[in-house]
Amino acid sequence: MSPDTLAVIWFVLLGFLLIGYAVLDGFDLGVGMLHPIVAKSDVERRLFLNSIGPLWDGNEVWLVTFGGALFAAFPPVYATVFSGFYAALMLLLLALIVRAVSIEFRSKRPEPRWRRFWDWCFAAGSFAASLLFGVAVGNAMLGIPLDEAGDATLAFVDLLNPYGLLVGGLTAATFCLHGGIFLWLKLEGELRDRLRHWLWRGFGAFLLLYLFATIFTLILLPNATTNFARFPAAFVVVVVDVVAIVNIPRCLYWQKPGEAFISSAVGIAGLVALFGLALFPNLVTANNDPTLSLTAFNAASSPRTLGNMLIVAAVGMPLVLTYTVVVYRVFRGKVRLSEHSY
């Protein structure tokens, strides 16, 4: 394979890993944000926790794999992202750590104050992580200033611009809706009915932010649609994404949680794919000088490295997918509490 072909393949594989993480850990983050708000009693909150208990740590493997693949396939991009987004990445790690600790510590003691404290830590960590993921996406779309050495020249507060926060809000709303649909699929009884009513409001908030983010993207970033002229088939992604999103309220009305979850997952996958299409071939866009941008071609590792990585991915990816399918199959069905539950 040519070096350019290998670079494009790894650009696509990174997108696949990002989709896997957004779809799978997205509902975990959503459950976390909803946990102290929708659930009214300790039993209901334990049900929320146990819906993701066997799954959440495996879902985060997709993020770790994404980081490892980015480091190996595009080292300059990894270096630039960590230098420019260092404070944001440390906050993201802190949010994910708080989240994980909350899940494990929450039910270790019976005192209401103890459990309430970890409930809100779980929610805060989930919200902060979702918001920061979205802020990173928004700034990747806007671009960041780079010097000739490829170092980012911006402060953390510069990342908290209106567009970045808008995309961050959309990401949090998307994960909330996705997590709510997952809970609707896994729970039963009065809690499930109450959750369905909440999902209508959640979908309304998501739709409003989705429309605002789309409008401002088209206004602020006209180049985001450039690749649609180069690759007309990419319009299929737009159609599939819109159909999936429109199908969610239909599923809510007809009470089809399984179909709603699939639609939500496809909608998230479509949004990540559109993000990749808007960026390609850039991985880090320099908004001060486009010639300084890091692309899939000028930031790629050697062809030998990319080729060897492709062999490893050909062996490893099926194993990861098989593990994911087996875990979800084993823990399918409704959530019920037992003596070993969280």
Image (cartoon, helix red, strand yellow):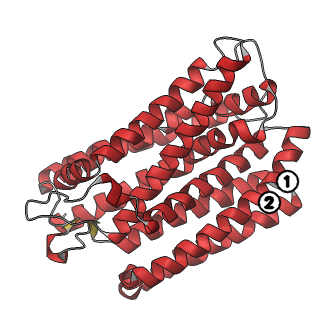
Image quarter in which the N terminus is found: bottom left
Q: Is residue 55 above or below residue 284?
A: above
Q: Mark 1: which amino acid?
A: His
Q: Which mark is residue 197?
A: 1
Q: In the image, is 80 to the left or to the right of 327?
A: left
Q: In the image, is 155 to the left or to the right of 245?
A: left
Q: Which mark is residue 200?
A: 2
Q: In the image, is 93 to the left or to the right of 173?
A: left
Q: Is residue 64 visible?
A: no
Q: Secondary structure beneath disc 2?
A: helix
Quadrant of residue 173 in the image? bottom right
Question: Badge 1 local density, few (<14 within 10 Å), some, or many (20+)?
Answer: few
* Residue closest to the far bottom: 229
x 69%, y 28%: residue: 50
Quadrant of residue 278 in the image? bottom left
Q: Nearer the viewer, residue 265 or 320?
A: 265
Tell me where residue 301 appears, x and y as whole percent.
15, 54
Q: Secondary structure beneath disc 1?
A: helix
Q: In the image, is 86 to the left or to the right of 52?
A: left
Quadrant of residue 247 in the image? bottom right
* Residue closest to the far left: 148
Q: Nearer the viewer, residue 250 or 139?
A: 139
